[in-house]
Amino acid sequence: MLNVAFDPIYAHALPEGHRFPMIKYELIPGQLLYEGTLQPGNFFTPGICSTETVLLTHTREYLDKLLFQRLSAAEQRKIGFPQSPALTHRELVITQGTIDCTRYAQQYGVSINVAGGTHHAFADHGEGFCLLNDFAISANHLLAEHPGWQILVIDLDVHQGNGTAKIFEREKRVFTFSMHGGHNYPFHKEQSDLDIALEAGTGDRAYLDLLEANLMLLLEKTQPELVFYLAGADVLGTDKFGKLALSLRGAALRDQMVFKALNKLQIPCVVSMGGGYSEDVKIIVEAHCNTFRAAIDIYGL
């Protein structure tokens, strides 16, 4: 069974003027239900991530700023959203959704959060529409339970996972891999354990060849107990900010490649959707839905 984290708050808690293309968080479940790919029983509603769990990753000072609405104007500009209690609540729900997905992934092989992938959030501040780093919090939560585990982050959003890289720069149990556009946000890149910076205009063939050349080597090197996979739809050539040139088919083949490799080695995989900023929201939704379709097909769920 494919267990999928979703709460309407993913879309509804966003401030006016910021809901496109974030409306995708409603449209993705709607499309998957409409076409029969998923049934209502596939979805679960996460609770709220506890303060203790968040503090495994983020500083107390920063969390208090989020909880008590103390972000400065400059900090809000860096995040890209005006602060609100609803927005903080949304981030805590999304984060708990990713944590819950780790349990389902261990049981069924894969689990997906309709939102998440907030990889620009650092321990002490947010950036780029990211307040809390759901992958980092979930990874640290797992390591608290399983200190001997090795975790791999496969970040294939078009933007480098700078917050994730910084959070884990001294943590040998978490290997961070980011394959991203080399000439877009964030303009100051942190150092992941492995970074592949792509030239503008990189298309399907070059992208998939690079991924294939590195993926199995990475899995052999790290031998992870669990993988977090960020399946950004902003790699598409239609994306307003990505600067790459993948087709919908190329992005789908990317997802299939990752899932096939992990399923073959029986490594549990937690997926978050990440970014997607094409002008036509139908393209964004189709790219994300392809990730769900690939997971169901390859894992036989």
Image: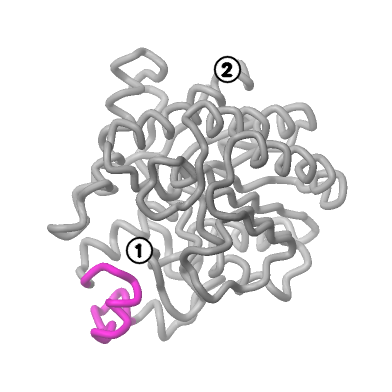
The chosen color scheme is one colour
- Provide the residue designation for mark 2: 297
* SS for callout 1: loop
Question: Is 141 left or right of 293, judged from the image as shown?
Answer: right
Which residue is found at the position 67% from the left and 31% from the top? 257
10 Å crowding of disc 1: few (<14), some (14-19), many (20+): some
Give the answer, above or below, for where 241 lies relative to 247. below
Which residue is found at the position 80% from the left and 44% from the top? 219
Look at label 1 and name its amino acid.
Answer: Phe
Say whether residue 72 is magenta.
yes
Rendered location of residue 204, percent (x, y): 59, 35
- The image quarter containing residue 74 is bottom left
Q: Start and end of the magenta stretch?
A: 65-82
* SS for callout 2: helix
Say whether residue 251 is magenta.
no
Residue furthest top as drawn:
36
* Distance CA(mark 2)–CA(mark 1): 32 Å
71 or 276, which lies in front?
A: 276
Question: Is 82 left or right of 144, judged from the image as shown?
Answer: left
Which residue is found at the position 45% from the left and 49% from the top? 274
- Provide the residue designation for mark 1: 129
